[in-house]
Image (tube, grey):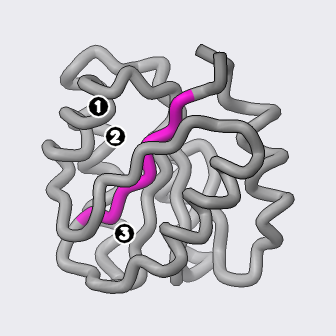
Amino acid sequence: MPRRILIAKPGLDGHDRGAKVIARALRDAGNEVVYTGLHQTPAMIAEAALQEDVRAVGLSVLSGAHTTLFPKVVEELRARGLDDVVVFGGGIIPDADIPGLLEAGLSVIFTPGTPLVEITEWVDAHVPNN
């Protein structure tokens, strides 16, 4: 059975091309991908992760709100008992912000220009199958 991954766009960021590219690459690599669409709250993302029984949540933010939104998604996941869900993020994220995001519970941050194969290989190595 393929691993299930949720790709989400938290906050008011209206740019989702990158998230759709990642979703497609992960699907092409044999994963089952659920994309929540734009303008999701952290609670909505966590609830979707619970309902969809996913093994990972990939977050994408281009608006600069990643230091607030990414940790809040992790908090909402943990509040629902989803401690084993792997959370990874991407977007326009300054290198200086990455250590804080990792401390907040994200497993990895992918920045613009990361080869798709690097992302799919990371998921294969770090996200368990269902």
Q: CA distance from mark 3 to mark 2?
A: 12 Å
Residue topped by disc 3:
66
| Quadrant that contains the N terminus | top right
Q: Position of residue 101 (x, y in %)?
A: 48, 56
- Residue 8: in magenta span: yes
Q: Disc 3 residue type? A: His
Q: Secondary structure at mark 1?
A: helix
Residue 116 location, x and y as percent? 77, 65
* Residue 48, numbered circle: none
Residue 91 in the figure: left or right of residue 127 = left
The kind of secondary structure the magenta stretch mainly shows is: strand
Give the structural element (helix, strand or loop) at label 3: helix
Q: Based on the displayed image, in which of its 4 quarters is residue 127 positioned?
A: top right
Identify the mark at residue 74; answer none if there is no mark.
Answer: 2
What's the magenta region?
4-10
Tags 1 and 2 touching, CB below 8 Å: yes
Height in image: 75 above or below 12?
above
Mark 3 in CB contact with mark 2 (< 8 angstroms):
no
Establish if 10 lies above or below 71: below
Seen in the image, is 92 located left or right of residue 35? right
Number of residues whose C-alpha sits closer than 10 Å to that of mark 1, classed few (under 14), some (14–19) or many (20 or more): many
Q: Amino acid at mark 1?
A: Leu
Viewer-closest of 41 and 37: 37
Instruction: Identify which residue, 99 or 43, lies in the foreground.
Output: 43
Q: Is residue 73 visible?
A: yes
Residue 119, picture quadrant: bottom right
Q: Secondary structure at mark 2?
A: helix
Q: CA distance from mark 1 to mark 3?
A: 16 Å
Q: Which residue is mark 1?
A: 77
